[in-house]
Image (spheres, helix red, strand yellow):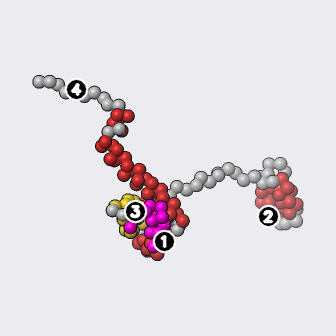
Amino acid sequence: MSKRQHQPISIERLFHQKQFAKIEQPLQQRVQLQQLGGEILARYKLQQCRIVNMRQGVAIIEAPSSAWLTRLKQFRFDLLSELRKAIPGVVSLELKINPELKNIKPEAEEKSTGKRQLSTQAAKHITELAKHVPDELREKLEKLAALSGES
């Protein structure tokens, strides 16, 4: 009896095999479809929806709720024409509800969390104003003017 020898195969060699090429091409098409679809859906303020797949010329779009599905139906023909311009193979749209999309939050832009600075000129105006108001308000305005750091 001969023993089998299992030697490691390099990753480059694996990726050049025909089996992976068959998987890679549809995967790249799907990624391209999702990117184009995301751009098109964003134009119609439908960021919560997404284009999932395309089978036999039918683009499948998922919505998180029936309300979003109704909105998708309103733009159905516009979306179809824009998708046809981008991807000529699109024949029709299939719209579905996927409640799991509610849990996926769109990427928000990072907001600056730095403290705001009060200009020295604004602080001077506030201190001048504080001289002519009641004591309670005067204290609060002086605290506000102190935020400038140079008053």
Q: How many marks?
A: 4
Tag in front: 3 or 4:
3
Which residue is located at x 83 percent, y 66 percent?
134
> What type of secondary structure mainly makes up the magenta span?
helix
Observer-nearest of 144 and 18? 18
Q: Earlier in the sequence, mark 2 or mark 1?
A: 1
Q: Give the foreground label among 2 and 3.
A: 3
Q: Which mark is residue 5?
A: 4
Residue for badge 3 = 89
The earlier-in-sequence mark between 1 and 3 is 1
C-alpha gap between disc 3 and disc 4: 47 Å
Q: Nearer the viewer, residue 55 or 44?
A: 55
Q: CA distance from mark 1 to mark 3?
A: 16 Å
> What label sits on residue 137 in the rendered view?
2
Q: Is residue 69 above or below residue 11?
A: below
Cα gap from disc 2 to disc 4, whole angstroms: 86 Å
| Quarter residue 124 falls in | bottom right
